[in-house]
Amino acid sequence: MRCPFCGHEDSQVKDSRPTEDGAAIRRRRQCEGCAARFTTFERIQLRELVVLKSEDRREPFDREKLLRSLLIAARKRPIEPLRLEKLVSGIQRQLETQGETEVHSQRIGEMVMDGLKGMDSVAYIRFASVYKDFREAKDFEEFAGNVSAVAKG
């Protein structure tokens, strides 16, 4: 594993343990070049996923990018980061077990929306504002009105 500080090729594993959600192994490493310590995570990957974006663009599925977008949507909300990690792990597992190597970005967005809907309405609306590309304040009003109506019903 390359050291993120000095770029040295070799490091020694000092400690390994499963993450809280059990979906990965957390390893503490020490660089043999500069002696700096850093953490890596090892996850199971069943298959390489490619995300089909708009205008026929393709990019590799990036678990960390998805998690970052959820953390932004949930900023200053009473949501444990572990719940968001579990949501991302669940989405990734579902996508990998479907048998397809390519998945439309809209499908991923729908899966995130489904997961956030029951978790926190504000995070749900924040994510929707980017996913659905809200342009004006009335877009927020209409969507929030629908969320409130569903919550009351």
Image (tube, grey):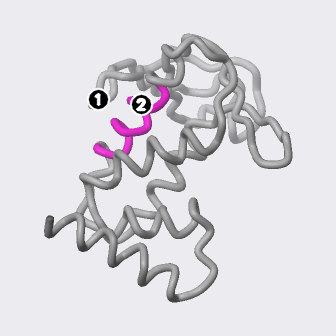
Q: Using the image, tell me which numbered label, if any, was put on residue 21.
A: 1
Identify the magenta region: 83-92
Query: Does the magenta segment cover residue 37?
Result: no
Q: Using the image, tell me which numbered label, if any, was put on residue 89.
A: 2
Type of amino acid at the residue the image marks with label 1:
Asp
Res 117 quadrant in image = bottom left
Could you tell whether 48 is left or right of 18 in the image?
right
Dot 2 alpha-carbon crowd within 10 angstroms: few under 14, some 14 to 19, many 20 or more: some
Give the answer, above or below, for where 125 lies relative to 19. below
Question: Picture coordinates of residue 8 (x, y %)?
Answer: 76, 27
Res 50 quadrant in image = top right
Label 1's element?
Answer: loop
Dot 1 alpha-carbon crowd within 10 angstroms: few under 14, some 14 to 19, many 20 or more: few
- Image quadrant in which the C terminus is located: bottom left
Report the number of numbered marks: 2
Which residue lies at the image location 42% right of the left edge and 51% below the top edge? 113
Q: Main secondary structure of the magenta part?
A: helix
Query: Does the magenta segment cover residue 91?
Result: yes
Question: Picture coordinates of residue 21 (x, y %)?
Answer: 29, 29
- Image quadrant in which the N terminus is located: top right
Type of amino acid at the residue the image marks with label 2:
Ser
Let me know if residue 33 appears in the view: no
